[in-house]
């Protein structure tokens, strides 16, 4: 799996860390970030679909 690095504000990182660990929803930061990216992309796909902006894979 490729690795990337990003810069994020400390406040956002602190909020993320509240959801990571034994008492959190995620095992580690990477899991939390991957989940957030997937969720965001799903939302963007839904918006594109509502506006007929998704490419139809069967069209060529």
Image (cartoon, rainbow, N blue to C red):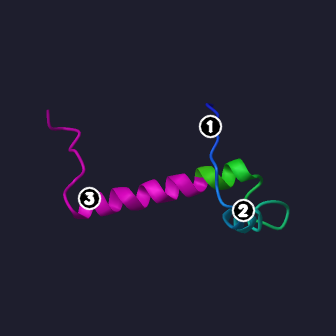
Say if the magenta span includes residue 52.
Answer: yes
Q: Mark 2 or mark 1, which has the lower sequence index?
A: 1
Identify the residue under disc 1: 4
Q: Main secondary structure of the magenta part?
A: helix
**Which residue is found at the position 19% from the left and 57% from the top?**
52
Q: Mark 3 or mark 2, which has the lower sequence index?
A: 2
Residue found at the far left of this picture: 60
Identify the residue under disc 3: 49
Could you say where residue 16 lies in the image, as x and y percent from the top left?
70, 63
Distance from the alpha carbon under mark 3 to that under mark 2: 34 Å
**Secondary structure state at the residue bearing disc 2:** helix
Judged left or right of residue 42, residue 2 is right
Q: Is residue 27 above or below residue 25?
A: above
Say if the magenta span includes residue 49.
Answer: yes
**Which residue is found at the position 31% from the left and 63% from the top?**
47
**Which residue is found at the position 76% from the left and 62% from the top?**
17
**Which residue is found at the position 24% from the left and 64% from the top?**
50
Residues shaded magenta? 35-60
- Viewer-side label of 2, 1: 2
Identify the residue under disc 2: 10
Distance from the alpha carbon under mark 2 to that under mark 1: 18 Å
């Amino acid at each position: 799996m490729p690795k990337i690095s990003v810069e994020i504000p400390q406040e956002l990182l602190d909020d993320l860390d509240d959801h990571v660990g034994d008492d959190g929803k995620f095992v580690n930061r990477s899991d939390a970030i991957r989940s957030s990216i997937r969720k965001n992309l799903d939302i963007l796909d839904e918006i594109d679909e509502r506006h007929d902006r998704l490419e139809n894979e069967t069209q060529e």
